Amino acid sequence: MNKNIHVFIVDDNRLLREGLVSMLAEQEDLVVVGAAANGRLALEKIIELRPEVALIDIGMPGKDGIEVTQALHKEAPEVKVIILGMIDLTDEIMACIEAGAAGYVLKEASFTYLVETIRSADRGESFCSPRMAASLFSRIAELAVERMPKLSKSSVRLTAREVDIINLIAEGLANKEIAQRLFIETQTVKNHIHNILDKLQLHNRLEAVEFARQRNLLKKQP
Amino acid sequence: MLSEVIKSMVEHQPDMEVVGEVLDPIELLIAVREIMVDVVLIAPMKDTGEPRICRQLLTENPMLKIMTFSAEGKAAFLYQSDSPTMRIDEPSEHSILTTIRKSMQHIVDDSLRTV
C-alpha cells in the first residue's frame, strides 16, 4: 500500500485555502496536516510538522512565498515546496526555482493538475506545464547566450584572410581600400568583417582590432 | 482552481445543485435563458466593479442572485435587482453559503440551482 503524502497549505485567500483543504482531503493518498494564512505562521508550523509537500501562495503580505521557500530550503530541506502563482512570468518561476521550490502551479490551473504536481513533488520529480517548460528553456537559452562570448572567444579560430583584414583595419584602411589591397570586392570585405564580428561576438571593427592586438595577431608595422 | 473550489463547495451542499458551468459571458447569457437558475456564481473577476454581465442578467431575470469573486479572493459581491450590492470581505465557505441562503429565503422551493 502506498504511503500517504502529508500536505500543508499556505494561502491568504481564505476561500481557496479552505476549499483546497476540503478537496485535497478527499484524495486517498493525501493528508492535509495544516493550513496557514501567512508566511510567518506557515514557516513555524511547517518546520514543526515536516509535511512531505507544502503548497505556498507566492503573494502573501509580510513574508511572501519565495521568502518562505528560501527559509524552508534551509531549515527543512526535505519538505517539497510547490508555489501557487498568479502569472507565469519566467523571472518569477526562476526565482521560485532558485529559492528551492520543487514546482510552480498557476492558480488558474486545474485541481487535477495540482494533485499530480503534489504527487510528482513527493516522488522527487518536477512537474511543469509545457508552457512553463518553454519559459524555462527560453531562460536557459538566454543564460547560455550570456555565457557564450566568454567561452567562444578563447576557442575561436580566425582564417588567415580574416587576420589579414583585421590587420588592414588596424592600419586605418576603409573597406574599399582593403578591397583594392586584397584584389577582392568591397562586399566581400564587408562579409569577412561581418563574419569576424559574429565569430568573436563583437560589435565593431575597433573591438576586432583590440581583440587581435591582445592575441598578438597584428603584424608589426614596417 | 478557485472556480473548482467554489463548484465543489456548492456540490457538497444538500440544498444546492450545480446545473451548469460556462466559460464566457455569452455562454452564461444563453445558459441562464435556457436553464432554470436561482444563483449565478462568477469567479474570479479581475476587478471589483460590477461586471456588465450582471446588469444584463438581472434585467432579463430580476429574481436572479449573482455572486462574483475578486481574483485575489479578498472579496465576494452579491448582486440582486431588489437590493443593494452586498460585499463580503475575506469570504469563507461559511459566509458565502450563508449569504446565498439568506438571499433565497423568500423562495418557497428549498432547492437552489446554481450555474
Image (tube, grey):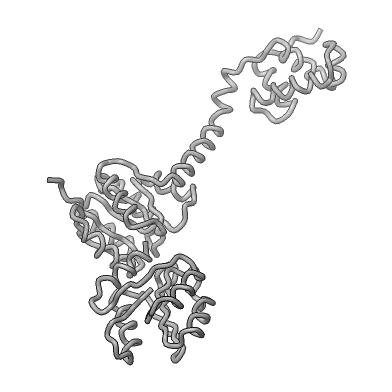
Q: Which quadrant of the figure has residue B20? A: bottom left
Q: Which of the 4 image quadrants contains residue A150?
A: top right
> Which residue is depicted at the point 84% across and 20% down?
A186
Relative to A159, say whether A190 is above or below: below
Q: Is residue A50 among the parts visible in the rendering?
A: no
Name the side, left or right, on which A108 lies relative to A139. left
State left or right for residue A44 relative to residue B50: left
- Give the residue furthest to the left: A1
Q: Vertically, is B106 above or below A2?
A: below
Q: Position of residue B114 (x, y in %)?
A: 36, 76
Q: Residue A122: x percent and y percent?
A: 25, 45
> Is residue A71 toward the left or the right of residue A168 in the image?
left
B50, A69: nearer the viewer:
B50
Which residue does the image show at 21% across and 57% down from the upper left? A27
Locate residue B4, reporting x and y percent: 34, 64
- Which quadrant is home to the N terminus of chain B? bottom left
Q: Position of residue A106 (x, y in %)?
A: 41, 55
The answer to whether any part of residue A116 appears in the image is yes
